[in-house]
Image (cartoon, rainbow, N blue to C red):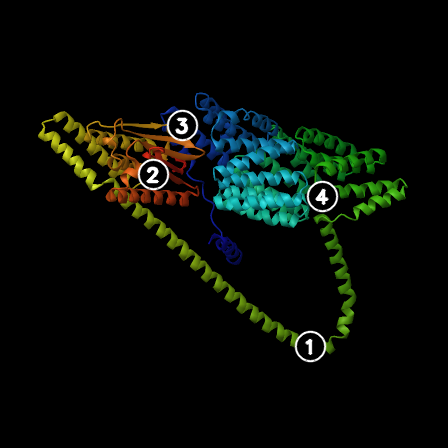
Amino acid sequence: MFRFTLPLLVLFVCLFGFSKKTLAGNGDEASYRKAYLNEKNGTKKFWRQVALGKFYQLNNVQKADSIRYSIIDASRTESDSAKLQALIFDLRVEALLGNKTAYYAKILQLQPYLSRTDSKLNQVHIFHLLAEYHIAFREFEQADIYLTEALRFSKRVRSYALIAETNRLFAKLNMEQNKRNASLEFAETSIQYARRSTDKSLMAKCVNMQSAIYNFFGQVELSVSKNFIALQLAKQANDYPQIAQYQREIGESQYQIFNYDNANNFFMQSRETAIKIQDFRLVGLADTDIGLVKLAKKDYEGAINDLKRVVKTLEDYNDQDGLGMAHKYLGNAFNEQNKYEEALRYYNMALVYFESASNRSEIASVYHLVGTVFAEQGKYKNALNYLNRSINIRSQYGYIGGIYPSYKEIADVYKKTGNMKLAYEYLDMYSDYSDSARIVEVSAKIAELSELYRSEQRERLIAIQADSIELQRKEKENTELRNIFQMYIIIGFIILLALGAFIIYNRWKQRNIRQLQREAEMNQTLLRSQMNPHFVFNAMSVIQSYIYENDTKNSTKFLINFSKLMRLILENSSKEFIPLTTEIDILNKYLETQKLRFGDRFEYEVSVNQQLLDEETVIPPMITQPFIENAIEHGQLHTVEGGFIHVRFTKDEEMLHVMIEDNGIGRKGSANNKKSAQHKSMAMKITQDRINNLSYKYKILGRMEIADYDKEKETGTLVNIYLPYRNEGTNG
């Protein structure tokens, strides 16, 4: 169904100009701060602060920066998982601030955690960051190893989001290796998995990666069209750092095809977004691009003033790439005014910054510019040296289409020095140049020739006008008929679209209603199974027997325990999730009640991994109760010598693992009792339906496995239940 929904929505946006107001993210600053400040438990307080920090990452970069060291300090007394999250938060802030040196250094600090964490989810995040590091430093084989492991682990935990991010990084890896087709295939795969994950922010990143690949290989028009989609997705996700970034990228693409007014509009939008989230580094980058537009419009004084102001801003953030671009554009401003010494000074400063950032593409670009300056000064040997260095870097590291302007400059140098043979050879190589800038140049020439042709034909058209009046009249009639026909087609198409959208919306609504009905039915069935009349009747009989025996102590203990159990069941059975601590409380009271009922003829144990308590895990209410009842009632646990029942809660590869084991008479022994078999079958069906419903809703495949505890004797029962892992943070 969703395959048709997205195209229809896009088409309606185009036809009717539908727009949606940007809303604040899930929650607001006040609610996050209140939850953090009011929390008394140290571990919970740490995770509340992390949640606040993540909110700031999307909404206020300055505040995210201000609390990162506090988060690191708070993590020192917490688990390795908490320490890892604090480090990842810290390096994400470094990325937002543009300090790549610190960012990559901190990625390497994560490597020891690969052996210190059992969480596949955490391991995949570390693999992603390490792969990103090795891609940046062109260590492609090592990056491929990390991404291959990340993909394997992502598939094991069945996470569409992790698979999407892994494929996105594979696309980046192949792009950097100049593998166009492979990079586009990985980008498309990442988009498909991101769409299944329903994470709009992630999907925006994947589409933006596709845009970057098209731009890298010189397909500017396709790059812009993809980035428009990425921008729309980022807006739907309220991911303001991404919005500001994509607005700048679209502006830069518009600049490449000489649409300076459109470019400036997008740069101004990026600046406004950056100010909104207090990201002054992004403000500086947007100002850099605005200065570039002024430079293109020959406003040299305005451009130079803007760029010098930007340099002071970016120096505060140690943004090597941004400083390199600002100095490069300053060099361009002086170069275009024939102030070559000043231009060379700024180009050399740009090289220092780009070399610090290991930005080989921009190093090659500056070498080309330095070569053109030397050519203008008549220093042809120096010019050829820098132009060839630019070609060598681009041939080895970047998009090969970027070398063609250098071929043309070299051809011009050889022409000036009288070496016509080499001039011709390089001009011939330049003639193969066919990137988007060349297309724009050729299109402009074609438009000029067409205009000249129309001028020459004007007099001839006037001379033959009298002979063509009838033909024009017929053509006009045909055109009118054609326009009417087209109008009917468009109206019919719009009606069909509206009808299709109505049908899809109806089906979506009906599906949601069915989903709610299923949940309500399961809640009722669950409550009936938990309030088993047989169990209640037996409990009342036990209380009655204690009273007849004047056993006040046991009757009081049993009655208090039983009443608390009933209250807990009634309070929580209607909820989708309850805290794991509440579930354990219910189990203990249920088992204690049963133990009192059967005169302490079996033992029980309920254990839980401390990590689950630290992370405030939640669980569907009383999902284990039917199996415990089966073990006691139908497994005849009270008749077995040394009878026991154990319940364990652990975290297994981002799934909540519940294990229930008993040493009763087992499935084979209880199969002879028809009533018992029917009850067990109903319990399993209810539980399986609940697991299926949760798997469908949260897109993580849960399961239930039942086996004999003692396989040789075919006695006892072992039940393993795997549920989508949720905690109070994800369930809020």
- CA separation, marks 4 and 1? 50 Å
Dot 1 crowding, Cα within 10 Å, few <14, some 14–19, many 20+: few
Label 3 or label 2, whichever comes before in sequence order = 3
Task: Give the foreground label among 3 and 4.
Answer: 3
- CA separation, marks 3 and 4? 62 Å
- CA separation, marks 2 and 1? 78 Å
Q: Mark 3 belongs to which amino acid?
A: Gln
Q: Assign a secondary structure to mark 1.
A: helix
> Residue 396 sits in which quadrant?
top right
Tag 3 and tag 4, C-beta contact below 8 Å: no
* Residue marked by disc 1: 471
Q: Assign a secondary structure to mark 4.
A: loop
* Residue marked by disc 3: 611
Q: Tell me if residue 703 comes above or below residue 612 in the rendering.
A: below
Of 676 and 574, which appears nearest the observer?
676
Tag 2 and tag 4, C-beta contact below 8 Å: no
Q: Mark 2 belongs to which amino acid?
A: Pro
Image quarter of the C terminus: top left
Tag 1 and tag 3, C-beta contact below 8 Å: no
Question: Could you tell me which residue is drawn at 14 percent across and 25 percent down?
Answer: 553
Q: Mark 4 belongs to which amino acid?
A: Lys
Q: Mark 1 belongs to which amino acid?
A: Leu
* Residue marked by disc 2: 620
Tag 2 and tag 1, C-beta contact below 8 Å: no
Task: Give the foreground label among 1 and 3.
Answer: 3
Please give left or right for residue 73 compared with residue 627 in the image: right
**Residue 47 placed where, x, y %?**
42, 29
| Res 309 seen here | no
Q: Assign a secondary structure to mark 2.
A: loop
**Residue 5 placed where, x, y %?**
48, 54
Please give left or right for residue 603 compared with residue 17 in the image: left
Counting labels gives 4
